[in-house]
Amino acid sequence: MEHGHGHGRPMTADEVRAMLEAPAWDERYGGEELVWSGFPNPQLVAEIDDVEPGRALDVGAGEGADAVWLARRGWAVTAVDFSAMALKRIAEHAAEAGVQVTTEQADVRDWAPPRGAYDLVNSQFMHQPPEVFGPLVTRLAAAVAPGGHLVVVGHHPTDLDKPEIGRPPVEEMLFTAEDVAARLDPGSWEVLAADTRPRQLIGMDGEPVTAHDAVLHARRRA
């Protein structure tokens, strides 16, 4: 069972906004310990486990657990993050796993992946202010090839009602699956999942707690 936070305490809104800059993540990833669990995000596994491998883009890739999992399953993976230390960790973890992952340093706030280049675009818990997040989803969707998949997962706003989960108080940076789906043209996309899914965590008080993930999985029509 996962811990519901990676900070030792809930982050303040100001601390969250500071984490929107690369130096903060370079510092965080610069220690010796893993920041995250090292396991792939469960909603990615649930949605993509049976999908035939192709070209994958993992955006906001962190320490690379999703990218390495995809590479092990035969995907040709490009992992993108704005933190140089994150990319270093991804390269190390890929080497340890004996797989190839291409890394690219980019800031998603002003970056656009090549259009139609990927059979899977994966974005897990990459929370941004609304004025950044909406256009980013549009750019990520544009990078999906015909017949390809878009998976976007985040913390659901209802988690804020449970202080024991430790979510930071920035409701405007959380989203629902329906928020993401609304940015996709129904004529071009088939929504395979737009769910609010429960997930068991260990809360700030050390006790089990149910959190909720917003899960959007859509396939571009061929």
Image: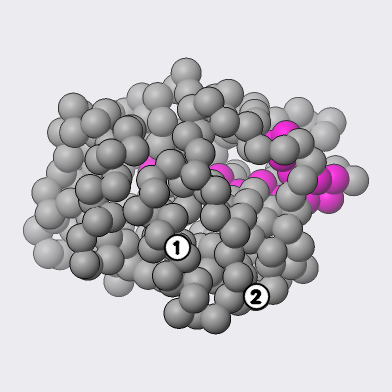
Label 1 secondary element = helix
Q: Residue furthest top?
A: 131
Residue at 34% x, 38% y is 22
Horizontally, is 194 left or right of 207 in the view? right
Is residue 153 found inside the magenta-colored segment of the image? yes
Give the position of the N terminus as an image quadrant: bottom left
Q: Position of residue 212 (x, y in %)?
A: 38, 50
Horizontally, is 7 left or right of 134 in the view? left
User: Where is mark 1, residue-wise?
Assistant: 90
Amino acid at the residue labelled 2: Arg
Amino acid at the residue labelled 1: Ile
Residue at 59% x, 59% y is 102
Label 2 secondary element = loop
Magenta highlight: main SS: strand
Mark with earlier residue (2, 1) = 2
Residue at 20% x, 60% y is 31
Q: Position of residue 123 (x, y in %)?
A: 53, 47
* Quadrant position of residue 128: top left
Is residue 157 found inside the magenta-colored segment of the image? no
Q: Residue furthest right?
A: 222
Q: Position of residue 138 (x, y in %)?
A: 64, 29
Residue 105 visible in the picture: yes
Residue at 33% x, 33% y is 20
Q: Which residues are magenta?
A: 141-156
Q: Which mark is residue 211?
A: none
Q: Position of residue 139 (x, y in %)?
A: 65, 31
* Quadrant position of residue 8: bottom left
Within 10 Å of disc 2 (Cα), the crowding (few <14, some 14-19, many 20+) is some
Rounded to the nearest angstrom, the CA distance separating label 2 from label 1 is 16 Å
Q: Are marks 2 and 1 in contact (CB under 8 Å)?
A: no
> Where 99 falls versus 89 (above or below)?
below
Q: Which mark is residue 73?
A: 2
